[in-house]
Every structure is written in C-alpha cells, then in structure tokens.
Amino acid sequence: MNWCCKMCKYETARKTELLKHYRLRHVHCAQILPCIYWECYCSFKTWASLKSHMTRSHSSYKAANVKDVLSFKCPCCTLSSITTEREYFEHIGRHLKKHETITCVFENCDFKTNIYGTFASHRTRKHTPHSLDDFKAELVHRHVNPVNVGDDPDDDEDIECGEGYDEERKELPSIIEANLAHLFLKLESISNVPKQCITEMVEELNFISSSASGPAMKDVLQSCFAKHKCQLDDSVITDIVTELCKSNPISQALRSDGPLSTAYKRNEYFKENFSVVEPVEYVLNARERRSYQYVPILKSLSEIFKKKEMQDFLMNSGKKAQNTETQYTSFHDGTHFKANKLFSENDLAIALNLYVDEFEVCNPLGTSRKKHKITAVYWVLANVPPLLRSSLTSIFLAILCKAEDIKQYGYNVVLDPLLKDLGRLEEDGLYIPSLGRQVKGTVFSVIADNLGAHSVSGFVESFSGSYFCRWCLGERSKLQDCEVRTGKFIPRIKEDHTVHVQTAQLSGFHSCGVKRQCPLTEKLKYFDVLSGYPPDLLHDLFEGVIPKEVALCLDTLIKKKYFTLSELNKLIREFPYKWTDKKDAPQPVPLNFAVKKTVGGNAHENWALLRLLPFIIGTRIP
C-alpha cells in the first residue's frame, strides 16, 4: 500500500517516510497540515497537534492500513480492483460526468443522482466525516495480507518518524538548527523583538543547554547506573556528561561559534537557507545621501511560484468561471478585467495589485512630524483566493522611500526599477520551471487613498478645485445641482485624457484636473489609468460619508426624544459585541457630534456601528 501526501502528491511505501517528508517539506511553510489519512478531513496548524491527533484517532487504524489490502467495488460497473478510497471516488466521478445514475455507497443511504456536483455535495453534507465501516458491506472487501507480525517495517516505529534510522539521525541536528532559526526569525519579524534581546536569549539558552544542565544530567546518570548495578568511576560519568552536552544539537547551534549566536550570523543563515530576496538601494542624490530601497519583484515572484499551492492558485485563476453575466464572484468577472488584452487573450496570466501608502515612523504629533514619513509600495498576487489577499503573509514589499524625496524627485524616478521589471513581465513573462513555460503578467490596479492615487496617476492633488474627480469631468460648482447617475457628468475617456495630458505638458498647468502622464501608463502597455485606480471605500465611505450620515440620523432621532445622547452611549457600551467586533467596537458618540456633523471613529469602528446600530437602538424607535 502506498502513502500519498495530500499537499504535493509525494508517494512512498512507508508511513514513516511520509511523516519525515511532512516535517522536512511542509511543517515550516504550510499554514495548515492535513492528516495523512485520506479518509480523515482534519487539519492542524502545528506539527505537535497533528501528532497528537494521529495518536488519539489513528493508533488502532494502523493495522487496517498496513496489514489489510482493501478493494472497492463500483456500484455502477463490474470493476472491483480499486484499492484506495480516493481512486474509488474518482472512478465514480467518471460515471457521473457521463450522467450515469449512481446510488450512494454509504450504509443506510438510498440517495441517487446522475449529477457530479450533486453527488459531491451530498457526500460532503451527509457523510463527512466517515470511515471504512460506513461503506456498504458489499462494496468494500478486506483481504488479509499474508505478512507475519513484525515483518512490516512500520509495526514498531513511533509517530515521531524516522527514529532508529541513521539517515534521520544525521539530519536531526540540521532540522533542530532550522527550527531554532525559524523561531528567532519569527521573534524578530512578527513579534518585533530587538536583535540584541534575541542575542541575549541565545546566550542564556546556550548556557542552560550545556553548562547548567551538566550537574542535573550527572545525577540522573548516577542514579540510573546504580539502579542497574553498574559501577563506573566518577571521572567516566563526568566525561559522558561532557560529551552529551557537547553533542547536544541545540548547544551546537547556539554556542559562541555556532551559526545562530550573533545577529550577523543569523542574517547570513537566513540568506543561505531561507528564500530571502534582498533589497537593492538606488541613489537619488549621493551628495545629500538621498536614496530608496527596492525589492526586485521578479525575484520575489520566482520564489513564490516555487510553492505548489501558489502554482495551483495560478492554474485555477486561469480557468474561465461559468457564471452568468449578472453574477460576480471577484474582480475577474468585471468588465475592466475582461477588457484587458493580456488577461483576456492568455489562459494563464499573473495579475498584480499595487498598494501605495504613507506612514509615520516617529510620533506624528511631536517635533519629528513629517520628517521621517515613509512612502511604501506593496504588491499582492491577485491570482490567490480573495480570502488570502488580505492576509499579511500575502502582501509583499516593493519600495520604501521618504515621502519628501517622492515630492522632490517624483514617482517617475522612484518607480522606475519596479516598472522596468513589470515591463519585462509583460513582454517576456516569468519562467516557471514546474509549468515549463513563460507566464506573462501586468498590474491590474493600484490601490491607494485619494491623495495617493492622484499623486501617482498625475491628477491634481487638491480636492477643493474645479476638477477633482479622476473618473469624470464634473465640476465642483455643479455638484449640488444634479446627481452623478443623471448622466450630466461626462466620464473621462482615453482619447480625452491623452489630450489633457498633452495640454498640461505644453502649458505647464493642469488641464481638466490632469497635471502629467501616469508613469504606469507610460511604461506599461496593458495598464489603463482611468480604470486602474479603483475607489477608496475605506476613506470615501467608512471615514467619509457614513459617519456624517449616521450623525445626521442620530441627531434627528435625539431631537425626536426617542433617546438621549447619554442613553445612546450607554447602549453602545453595553451591547454584547462578538468576535472581531469586540476589538473594533464603536466608540461613544462625542458631545459635539451634531455641530461637527460626524460621529468620528475609524473605518472599522464605523463599519461595526453601521451594521449593529439597528440592534443597538431598534427597540427605542417606533
């Protein structure tokens, strides 16, 4: 019987080899670890929880897996030589794709269908989880393998996988070393522990694992030898303890000449053993020491697509969704995406979303305000599922530059190395060895707040002027006269925008709100400036329109004496918030909200208030 990895389809005849493969290949890079048994749908976040599950749930199943040879009989045809459950359901699926009627294969279930999706849905809803005992008896046969107990190499092996094998023992120090390196890297990059603190921790751990543990180890050895009536000289026991401390893999990794003892050595270890893409410094002005950092995007993409799951995301995103014209599941169903020639003409294409934002390194209210403000450009692979795009592990850094340097030198200069790499991605593509082909890609959209979007795209950065919209030619003086949906505001089109850019370049003044050419449009032939900067819902709605509208509504309800402001704030404080709403619970409404015409709050708090307000005050409103 072969064991097959659920994550990369690696096959082996031994369970211990599969567990060893899990530890070496997937424990440190996968977010979840599925159980190695194909009929078990449990998954875990850590190696320890997976081991605990297998000890509890599959210790008695070991004999059935190794000692018994299974054969499944198809309920539709005469085939009875299928030996794995996975192949069994794949075979049934082929019958269903031919619209042949299949009766459910599980005991006490008479469900019938000739539709593949219906059968899969029924199996998931009604028979998950299940075991071999749940199948109909006439469809599963167990043939005892004539192998004597003790002949099977998996009989006496522990779930720790590989204990007793010389090969595994040789790899154990490197595995422990890699685990420690991962731990220190997480402390530094995720928990923001200073490097000096990590170095002190390494020194203490080295002392504990070597010198400090010696006396305790010596006492244990002496008591063990005495128990078994072994007489050894004290000097011999001391030598044994010394050798054990020296050969301890943890001590070898943490000792003063080890690879993880200092911050410099740890960084070198990360570069050598982990997938590190180092940033490149570009000098803006050598005399004034003006520079910025760029992380090469093509190298980052090459490292990303070495992972099997990322290749699967790319392949699945290239499949055309069978949706109606009125059904939207993601931006792939939108007209702007379908109008892009690169995405519409290629079955596989890399879609990228860029993020542009500014942040303060120092206190934004102190004397250092704006002195150390940083402009960052991030990117996200849009081929991954929507649920993963907002995860921090899916967001990658491209550029870090001081905001004042951006203003002085412009986005054309700072974005130049990024746009050159993206131009090569459009023209030549990225070679993915596992797919055996070049895959082209481009930027689909640039996400930023309104000020950032207008700064990059070349529109005016003042929103009090006449032409302040990057989608239409509506003037501010006409905003109160008509609605956008009336059609009186002329939308911007590509031909007019080209004329506005040329006029602005010749005159030196903005033309209909356009100051200059967008650097992305200038360097990338598949990027459209008019559709490539989507609205900023967070600032426009949750920190713009919504707090004002909620303030107007609450002011009216208070004036009608349905409740007072103090009663409202008491209801907001005492509402039983759940899950993420606990962290983003709305703040009390300020006393001067009616004058300011806003309830304040950040985007997450206003989103929670908007959703939960009917439940908070609903009983008070007639």
Image: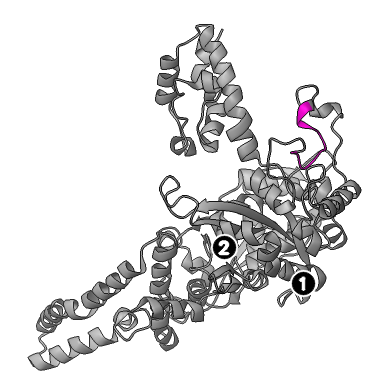
- The amino acid at mark 1 is Arg
Q: Which residues are magenta?
A: 468-477
Q: Position of residue 23 (x, y in %)?
A: 48, 72
Mark 1 Cα shell of 10 Å, populated few (<14), some (14-19), many (≥20): some
- Where is residue 551, by image quadrant? top right
Element on which disc 1 rests = helix
Q: Which mark is residue 400?
A: 2
Please, is residue 174 above or below residue 317 in the view?
below
| Residue sitting farthest toward the front | 507
Q: Residue at x 45, y 47 (%)?
A: 364
Q: Quadrant of the C terminus?
A: top right
Q: Nearer the viewer, mark 2 or mark 1?
A: 2
- The amino acid at mark 2 is Leu
- Where is residue 436, by image quadrant? bottom right
Q: Position of residue 116 (x, y in %)?
A: 77, 50
Mark 2 Cα shell of 10 Å, populated few (<14), some (14-19), many (≥20): many
Q: Is residue 19 visible?
A: yes
Q: Position of residue 445 (x, y in %)?
A: 73, 53
Q: Which mark is residue 424?
A: 1
Q: Quadrant of the N terminus?
A: bottom right
Q: Position of residue 482 (x, y in %)?
A: 81, 23
Q: Are marks 2 and 1 in contact (CB under 8 Å)?
A: no
Mark sitting earlier along the chain (2/1): 2
What is the magenta segment's predominant secondary structure? loop
Please, is residue 511 above or below residue 199 in the view?
above
Q: How many marks?
A: 2
Element on which disc 2 rests = strand
